[in-house]
């Protein structure tokens, strides 16, 4: 199981609810959540065999900001 972490613009429940179906349809995501208390609105994804770039592409193509945070 991998944990992927992204900086996003998912800053309120409305944006998270709109992005939710996109995330739920990505094959390999087991669980996800957004920390709106964090200044980067961190999206954490538990996944198996999922490319961070594919998550970025899907969210960015839908009009959201999404950038993987490196260790």
Image (tube, rainbow, N blue to C red):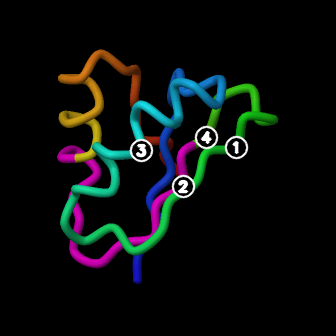
Residue 64: give x, y in percent of width and height.
37, 21
- Outermost residue to the right: 37
Residue at the image point whose x is 23% and y is 56% from the top: 25
Count of marks placed on residues: 4
Instruction: Determine which residue is flagged by label 4.
Output: 42
**Mark 2 residue element:** strand
Q: Residues within 10 Å of mark 4 (few under 14, many from 20)?
A: many
Q: Please rate how many residues cluster around mark 2, counting C-alpha atoms within 10 Å: few if below 14, some from 14 to 19, many from 20.
A: some
Q: Identify the image quadrant of residue 35.
A: top right
Q: Residue at x 40, y 83 (%)?
A: 1
What whole-number distance in Å separates the C-alpha atoms at marks 4 and 3? 14 Å
Disc 3 and disc 2 in contact, CB within 8 angstroms: no
On the image, the x and y values in percent for residue 43 come to 54, 45
Tag 2 residue:
44
Which tag, 4 or 1, sits closer to the chain's start? 1
Q: What's drawn in magenta, residue-wise?
A: 43-54
Among the two numbered marks 1 and 3 on one chain, the one whose residue lies closer to the N terminus? 3
Give me the disc on residue 20.
3
């Amino acid at each position: 199981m991998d944990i992927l972490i992204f900086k996003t613009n998912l800053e309120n429940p409305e944006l998270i609810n709109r992005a939710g179906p996109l995330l739920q349809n990505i094959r390999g995501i087991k669980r996800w959540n957004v920390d709106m208390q964090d200044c980067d609105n961190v999206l954490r994804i538990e996944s198996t065999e999922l490319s961070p770039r594919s998550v970025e592409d899907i969210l960015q193509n839908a009009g959201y900001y999404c950038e993987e945070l490196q260790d």
